[in-house]
Amino acid sequence: MQRVSETKWFPLRVAFALWVLVLLAVEVSGHRNWLVILVQVLLILGIIVTSALDLWDLRRRRAAAGPPPH
């Protein structure tokens, strides 16, 4: 049985966050250009979108499971 708190988009969100950190290191090393910033923005948007998808999925699963037992 799968726990309700497990989210299916979490691994992708972690990968996005790691790539944002890698690109931040690239920026700090002096290779700042518009392409690096554009990719960072897209990855951050991916983090936001996957967070919203996880919240939507958790709410849907909780609603399908019914009210908690007393």
Image (cartoon, grey):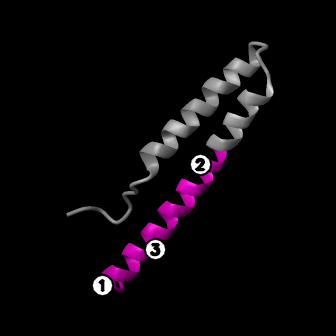
Q: Which mark is residue 69?
A: 1
| Front-most of residues 34 and 43 | 34
Left/right placement of residue 13 relative to residue 61 reads: right
Query: At numbered mark 1, what does the secondary structure look like: helix, strand or loop?
Result: loop
In the image, is residue 67 part of the stretch drawn in magenta? yes
Q: Nearer the viewer, residue 49 or 2?
A: 49
Where residue 59 is drawn, which disc sits there?
3
Q: Residue 39: x percent and y percent?
A: 67, 35
Q: CA distance from mark 2 to mark 1?
A: 36 Å
In the rendered structure, which segment of residues is drawn in magenta?
A: 44-68
**CA neighbours of label 2 inside 10 A, class few (<14), some (14 to 19), many (20+):** some
Residue at (43% x, 68% y) in the render: 58
Q: Give how far across and how far down residue 65 sits, in percent.
A: 31, 80
Residue 13: x, y in percent?
51, 45
Q: Quadrant for residue 51, please give it.
A: bottom right
Residue 28, given in percent of the width and then of the height, sits at 76, 18
Residue 2 in the image: above or below residue 19: below
